[in-house]
Amino acid sequence: MSDDLSVAPERFREAMSRVGSAVHIVTTGGHAGSAGITANAVTSVTAEPPTMLFCLNKTSRAAPLLIQNGVFCINTLASAHQELSDIFAGRTEHALEERFAAASWGKLVTGAPVLTTALVAFDCRLIEAKEMSTHLILIGRVEAIDVAPKTEALLYMHRGYKQI
């Protein structure tokens, strides 16, 4: 462990496993190609203008596609989407381009794939990408929103899925 770390990464990961969060599939589509990843480090930034952010490992195969496309959609998952979450998390044998065959997708404004059964979809245009150690912090202005009828959400806590 490096001397400049006040908290060991393993301890931090264990602590963060106690923090429940919504599960999302973040997608991109455009001239660079389509990709999607499962994410739980997602939050709103401002309401005026509507802005969202998410964090992505720099080594993700989706990272360069997202940066080149300049668009992304944050698709918040319902409780029925656990298997889809695993597919986009890379826990199955599905290649990046094969992941989209497991669900129905549409588009709103930016062209990023929108999960038609998502609880809510935030269609965003990338306005900033900031490198922070092992990850990228990607900030986007919300161009469109699709809201589904209320249903149970898929959450991740204690290294497992929960439904509320």
Image (tube, rainbow, N blue to C red):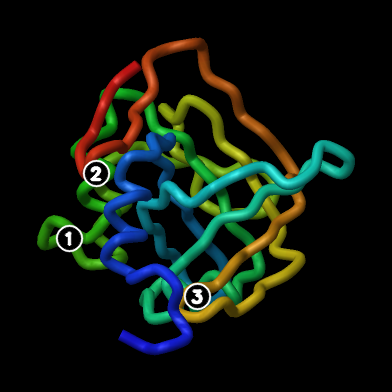
Depth check: give the residue in front, 18 or 139.
18
At which x and y percent is residue 65?
A: 50, 75
Vertical relation: 2 (above or below) 156: below
Q: Does 143 sit left or right of 88 as displayed?
A: right
Mark 2 against mark 3, which lies toward the viewer?
A: 3
The residue pinned by badge 3 equals 65
The residue pinned by badge 1 equals 94
Helix, strand or loop at mark 3: helix
Mark 2 or 1, nearer chain start:
1
The residue pinned by badge 2 equals 102
Q: CA distance from mark 2 to mark 3?
A: 20 Å
Q: Does 131 sit left or right of 45 as displayed?
A: left
Q: CA distance from mark 2 to mark 1?
A: 9 Å
At which x and y percent is residue 20?
A: 38, 35
Residue type marked 2: Ala
At which x and y percent is residue 15?
A: 34, 50
Helix, strand or loop at mark 1: loop
Vertical relation: 45 (above or below) 127: above
Which quarter of the figure is the C terminus placed in? top left
Depth check: give the residue in front, 131 or 150.
131
Depth check: give the residue in front, 141 or 102.
141
* Residue positioned 54% across, 48% down in the render: 42
- Image-quadrant location for residue 145: top right
